[in-house]
Structures are given as structure tokens and as C-alpha cells.
Amino acid sequence: MKPSVVRAYHLADPGENDSDTELEAMTQWVVEKLGPDVPMHFTAFHPDWKMTDKPPTPVTTLQRARAIAIKNGVRYAYTGNVHDESGGSTYCHQCGTKLIGRDWYVITEWRIGKAGQCPNCSTTCAGVFEERPGDWGAKRQPVHLKAHA
């Protein structure tokens, strides 16, 4: 199976582009035009800098978008920019086994080998995988502004 190099991202802006109608149309288009193996990432908006007049995207909005995508045939749909282990994890599209557990940048589970097969039903998951997860992950460092003043 050829790995996907295309990813679809959707920044869910509350009240702007998060209606069921828009999410239905977009996810159907992705499956029809790009295929069911293209990962879709539904990302939370956070009010920062010059865009502080809108509220942050509720986790429930991202979960709803993910559910609509899966219903429409997207095999790998994710929630992002929020703590949502269920929505950030990768599952076998055939049997539903959790293959890679993720909570933000932390890998919580790794049940997929280099061949990308589900250990439960042997279905191949689209993508490129290693035998074990790398040591990448949360790398945030505190910044002490007083030290740089």
C-alpha cells in the first residue's frame, strides 16, 4: 500500500466553519477526491494575539467533526490542539483496535509494527511506521523573560 503524503487540515473556527453542513460536504469531498486514507486533522482555534474576539473551539466541536468524517468514510480522522486521547489516536479501520495512542504530543500506546499491520486482524494501516516509537514528543521548554531583559 502506498503511504499517503497528503494530509487535510481544518482549523475549526467557532461559528465560522463548524456547521454540520460544511463538515459533511468537506469530508465527503475529501473521501471522493483524495481517498479514504488521507488523514484529516480537525484543529482547535485558540484566541491569541490579534484574534482575541472569538472563543476557543470546544473539544465537543472537534469530536463532532471527527465523527462526521468517520461516518463519511475517512479512515484516519483526528482532533488536534486539545487533550483528547481518543481523538488523537490511530485506530485500525477494519476492526477498531487502537494502534497508536496519543495524548497531545505523548505516545501512550504503540501496537503497530514496521509493516503497518494491525496486531488483531492483520489489516494494513496506510502510512510509514517504525518498529517502535521514537523519542520525539513534548519538547516544550520554559522561557524566563526576565533572564533576557
Image (cartoon, rainbow, N blue to C red):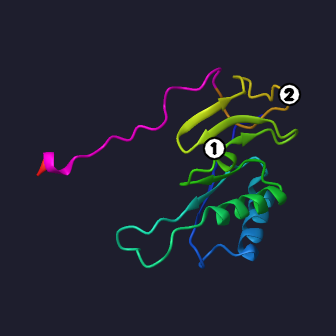
Q: Would you place residue 39 above or below residue 132 in this image?
A: below
Magenta segment: 130-147
Instruction: Identify the secondary structure beneath mark 1.
Output: loop
**Residue shown at the point (54%, 37%) measured from the top left:** 106
Tell me whether circle 2 and circle 1 mark residues in contact (CB < 8 Å). Answer: no
The amino acid type of the residue labelled 1 equals: Val
Q: Please name the predominant secondary structure of the magenta segment in the image.
A: loop
Indicate the position of residue 76 as horizontal and vertical percent values.
73, 47
Name the outermost residue toward the left.
Answer: 149
How many numbered circles are shown?
2
The tag earlier along the polypeptide, 2 or 1, is: 1
Can you tell which mark lies on residue 120?
2
The amino acid type of the residue labelled 2 equals: Asn
Based on the displayed image, in which of its 4 quarters is residue 21 positioned?
Answer: bottom right
Magenta stretch holds residue 122:
no
Magenta stretch holds residue 137:
yes
